[in-house]
Image: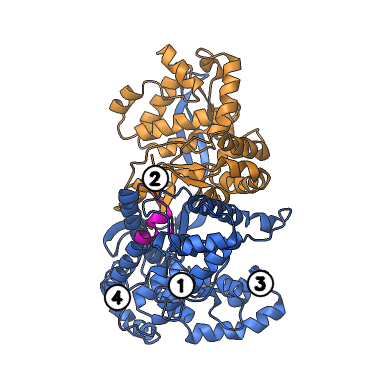
Amino acid sequence: MHTERRTQLLEGKLPLPKADKLASMFPNDIDNIHSMFKSLWHNYVGNPNNKLSIPYWYDMFESHKTFTFILRKLSEGGWITTNIISNANWGDMWLNTDKLLEYVSQEELNRIRAEFKYRKYTLGFDKSTKTKATRQNGFTRDTGLVREGFAKAGNTQFGYDTDYIKSNSEVINRNLVKSMEKVREKFPEMQTDEASYDEIAVGVRQVYEDSPEELYTMGHNFNDSRGRAISSCLSKLGNPISSKDFRALLVVSYD
Amino acid sequence: MQYTTKAQLLFIAELNSFKEGSEEDKIKFGLDCYAEHRLHELDLSDESDRAEQHENIWLSRLYNELDSAHNVCTALERKVALTIETISNTYQWSVPIELDASASMLQYEGALLGDKRLLAMTNCTTEDGITDPWGTIEGVPRMAVKKRFTPSLYGSSQTTEELLKNAKFTPSEIKEYKPLIEQEEHEGAFGLANKFKDFIINNAKPRETMTVHIWNEKFEVQCNRFKRIGEYSKFYKTYNTSTKRNKVFKNTHTKKVADLKQFKRYFVTLLVHNLDSQIADYVSGKLADKYGWVIPIHDAFIVPPQAALDCRTWYAEKLTELFDNRETILANYFKSIGITARALKEWQEVKSSIHSVDMFKCELMALK
């Protein structure tokens, strides 16, 4: 388990501990448990001093008993610290660096954070399977809308023309920095990220430029409340939907 | 000329800002642009010009791929090569093209209402050639028409003055355009679309959670507009690490209730966006099955050039099907959002503004 977790961490991933057991114990809240732990990790990578709001996650869970149980178990396992300040009417939680250092060195952790910073905003090669996931008022649920065509489109494999990325790097960088403002509005955790937008934009563009053979997909599709597509790739920089520069750089893959 | 080549040239023409003329004119314009490797003249130190650079990137990549596939390098060779076809139909192009609906809101309303003006201006019928939907009010620049009508067709209650002022038109320009826009509102196709919007907003009876019926789908929607009516405190009891015990704290929240009046404005885009998403989903699925490659962007599709004919055909077939079933679609929708026979008189008024089309079979240029 130690080696497996170390390998996962070196790849920038931190899966929920004892996920299978928790899934069988709390089937109704397992998605929330995964989301909360993922948020703890993503926030940590952005900045180890980042904290998550306890009221927010408490309200997200179907069972408050489950929520408290999870906080206690993660806390007792050394993964997180919860801090409730009754006088200030507030409570928050964060991931513990000491726990991570049981698996990787500080130097490795710094490198993971630096790489993750770019990977988080870079397109991946994710499989799309969701057809009934509809986002409404901040929640995802099945409202009766089914979008099988959009799910299939999420598996379209595409590349980018890296020669043109290189020859248009200055314009692409400047347009990306501008577009990051929009991404930031949608994903507030970016607001506390220490790295500057310019640095991330240049870094992400460089990742694409340095990967001429790389293929990407848009990944899962979510429906908006009317049925239109909201691709998961919208949270990535240089996605072909919101970035017209990258749309113009698309390469059709016939693999 | 095979359709794949036509599709590439149509897209080249689109990127080079072709607005009006026949399909043949557009293809010819695309061929001229390709032969000359025509690009936009941009000042990349200017932000608005930088926002257009993607068109030059796309054009340049298309030109290079066509040159390479046809093994040509002069303007004359390019024209000859594309006119006397030499490329196999199964050639796997690497640069995709984008097929985009012309003002899809108007296109869907045209099909739902069976209005020949809306169908013509959105290129679902092209007897009078390909048109620019925003360039149809004489004496008013297309940007003013677009900035005036897009928000209001989507449910905005802002006035012409407010919308044009937001779009940075000067007071004298607003004074000049306003009467022409008002005339269009009363008598024109935009006016019909506006009346249709108003009819839905005025007569919908929303509930906080409700099931709506649009064409082939029944699904649940929830009110997405809320009013703040004060604050409330909530107690939380959960685990605290330092004391190793559960601890209680109080947190203040804003109290909100559903704003059903504002929610009425949702029902126009609910109808149109749901319809366009049903069609986009259908077309995307077919393209993914046959070509394994499509990137849908609401009312546009990015496809390999060899998929363009199928994409346009399937899209047009579905819009025709929507038109054929329009009365049932509207009746079911109105019923599901609480529009009853009481609104019949107002509905008859909307219908009296329709310039009915007798027969309709959507044309391929509906995706321009």
Which color has been applied to chain A in this rendered view? orange
> Chain for mark 3?
B
Residue B262's x, y, as percent? 46, 65
- In the displayed structure, would residue B88 be above or below residue B13? above
| Callout 1: chain | B
Q: Position of residue B238 (x, y in %)?
A: 45, 28
Q: Which residues are magenta?
A: B293-311
Q: Which residue is mark 1?
A: B23
Disc 3 marks a residue whose amino acid type is Lys
Quarter occupied by residue A107: top right
Q: CA distance from mark 4 to mark 2?
A: 40 Å
Name the foreground residue: A80 vs B137. Answer: B137
Q: Earlier in the sequence, mark 1 or mark 4?
A: 1
Identify the disc placed on residue B165: 3
Task: Mark 4 vs mark 3: give the one in front.
Answer: 3
Q: Are marks 3 and 2 in contact (CB under 8 Å)?
A: no
| Chain B: colour as depicted | blue
Q: Amino acid at mark 2?
A: Gly
Specify whether disc 4 shares its chain with disc 3: yes
Report which residue position mark 4 lands on: B340
